[in-house]
């Protein structure tokens, strides 16, 4: 399900850099019918880099594996995490501070955005 029992985490001695991964990549690795399955497997087999999964996607991946493939796929995913075959990036306090800063910048930008004038609800005569 996950490549070669994965062996994709820090257990590989030549590991160079983490490769951020999201739900789509993990589903493609697990689902042979996924259009990206072969490409994802080929990439993973060709690199010594570690797949780095944000902790925030774990529930979504587990749910989708269970729903789309079955409970055995969800169990294999949980096993891969427990055995450190997949690296999980936890949320740190600095991440929340950065998120707060980004959110404030977005709110400030939206306040300064030019908006088109509202259309009147009345009919033209």
Image: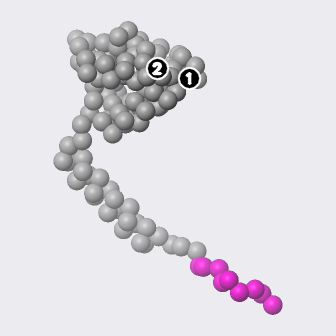
> Residue at point 46% right, 20% down?
30
| Magenta segment | 117-125
Q: Residue 14 location, x and y as percent?
A: 25, 12
Horizontal side of residue 75 vs 37, given as left or right: left
Residue 52 tag number: none
In space, the residues marked 2 and 1 are separated at their CA atoms by: 8 Å
Q: In the rendered view, tell whether residue 121 sits above or below residue 97.
A: below
Q: In the displayed structure, would residue 17 be above or below residue 48?
A: below
Which class describes the residues within 10 Å of circle 1: few (<14), some (14-19), or many (20+)? some
Task: Please give left or right for residue 74 compared with residue 13 in the image.
Answer: right
Identify the coloring.
one colour
Q: Mark 2 points at which residue?
A: 30
Please tell me whether mark 2 sits on a helix, a strand or a loop.
helix
Whether the magenta-drawn stretch holds residue 120 is answered as: yes
Residue 75 x %, y %:
37, 21
Task: Tell whether position 71 is magenta.
Answer: no
Q: Is residue 21 above or below residue 108?
A: above
Q: Which mark is residue 34?
A: 1
Q: Residue furthest top?
A: 4
The residue at the point 38 percent across, 61 percent down is 106
């Amino acid at each position: 399900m996950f490549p070669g029992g994965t062996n994709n985490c820090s257990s590989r001695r030549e590991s160079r850099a983490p490769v951020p991964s999201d739900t789509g990549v993990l589903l493609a690795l697990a689902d042979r019918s996924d259009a990206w399955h072969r490409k994802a497997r080929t990439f993973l087999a060709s690199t010594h880099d570690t797949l780095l999964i944000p902790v925030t996607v774990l529930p979504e991946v587990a749910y989708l594996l269970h729903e789309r493939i079955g409970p055995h796929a969800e169990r294999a995913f949980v096993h891969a995490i427990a055995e450190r075959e997949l690296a999980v990036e936890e949320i740190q306090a600095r991440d929340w501070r950065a998120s707060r800063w980004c959110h404030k910048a977005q709110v400030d930008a939206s306040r300064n955005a030019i908006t088109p004038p509202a259309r009147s609800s009345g009919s033209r005569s």
